[in-house]
Image (tube, rainbow, N blue to C red):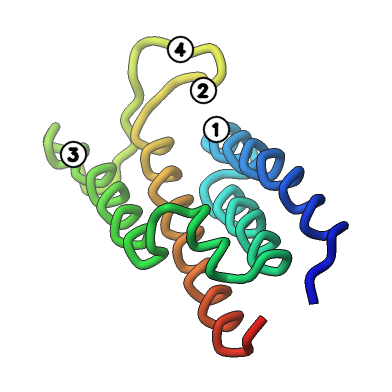
């Protein structure tokens, strides 16, 4: 049974939840938050969409298969880790740039690592949520 209130609210909240998840990602490499918390909030936006309109509509709004998100996120984490050996340092050594950006602060490999974790957590969470919702027939 579809609910007009849930459908309207989920459309309004989706943008806000995605912006908040991005805020958590950018804030997290210096303060509490980061890729894990941001990825869960982003997944909750699509989970809410799946509850209101069905998992097929949420998959369409995502544009990418959740398994592809997992692979992309792991590739980002690997790239972040390989910056250290490229400079003769151990794998996953944190390296920072010289310039400070207004919203991000000091960009570096920890932010890149957090972005990879964000994408992996979002992909795994959505894969579980969509599979459970499709199996149950929500």
Q: Earlier in the sequence, mark 1 or mark 4?
A: 1
Name the residue that disc number 3 marks. Answer: 89
Per the rendering, the mark at residue 104 is 2
- Position of residue 130 in the picture relative to residue 15 (left or right): left
Residue at (60, 33) in percent of width and height: 27
Q: Earlier in the sequence, mark 2 or mark 3?
A: 3
Closest to the camera, between mark 1 and mark 4, is 1
Neighbour class for label 2 at 10 Å: few (<14), some, many (≥20)?
some
Q: Secondary structure at mark 1?
A: helix
Neighbour class for label 1 at 10 Å: few (<14), some, many (≥20)?
many
- Position of residue 89 in the picture relative to residue 12 (left or right): left
Per the rendering, the mark at residue 99 is none
Q: Secondary structure at mark 2?
A: loop
Residue at (79, 70) in percent of width and height: 2
Name the residue that disc number 4 marks. Answer: 100
Position in image of residue 39 (x %, y %): 55, 53
Residue at (45, 44) in percent of width and height: 114
Q: Earlier in the sequence, mark 2 or mark 1?
A: 1
Position in image of residue 8 (x %, y %): 80, 51
The residue furthest bottom is: 136
Q: CA distance from mark 1 to mark 4?
A: 13 Å
Q: In the image shown, does 126 or 5 lie closer to the viewer?
A: 5
Q: CA distance from mark 4 to mark 3?
A: 23 Å
Tell me: residue 15, above or below residue 44. above
Neighbour class for label 3 at 10 Å: few (<14), some, many (≥20)?
few
Closest to the camera, between mark 4 and mark 3, is 4
Name which quarter of the figure residue 17 lies in: top right
Q: CA distance from mark 2 to mark 1?
A: 6 Å
């Amino acid at each position: 049974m579809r609910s007009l209130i849930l459908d309207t609210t989920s459309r309004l909240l989706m943008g806000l939840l995605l912006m908040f998840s991005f805020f958590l990602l950018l804030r997290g490499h210096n303060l509490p938050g980061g890729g894990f918390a941001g990825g869960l909030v982003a997944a909750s936006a699509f989970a809410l969409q799946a509850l209101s309109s069905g998992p097929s509509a949420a998959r369409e709004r995502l544009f990418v298969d959740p398994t592809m998100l997992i692979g992309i996120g792991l590739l980002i984490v690997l790239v972040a880790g390989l910056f250290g050996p490229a400079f003769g340092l151990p794998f996953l050594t944190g390296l920072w740039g010289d310039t400070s950006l207004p919203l991000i602060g000091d960009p570096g490999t920890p932010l890149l690592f957090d972005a990879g974790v964000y994408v992996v957590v979002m992909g795994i969470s959505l894969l579980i949520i969509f599979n459970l919702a499709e199996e149950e027939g929500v």
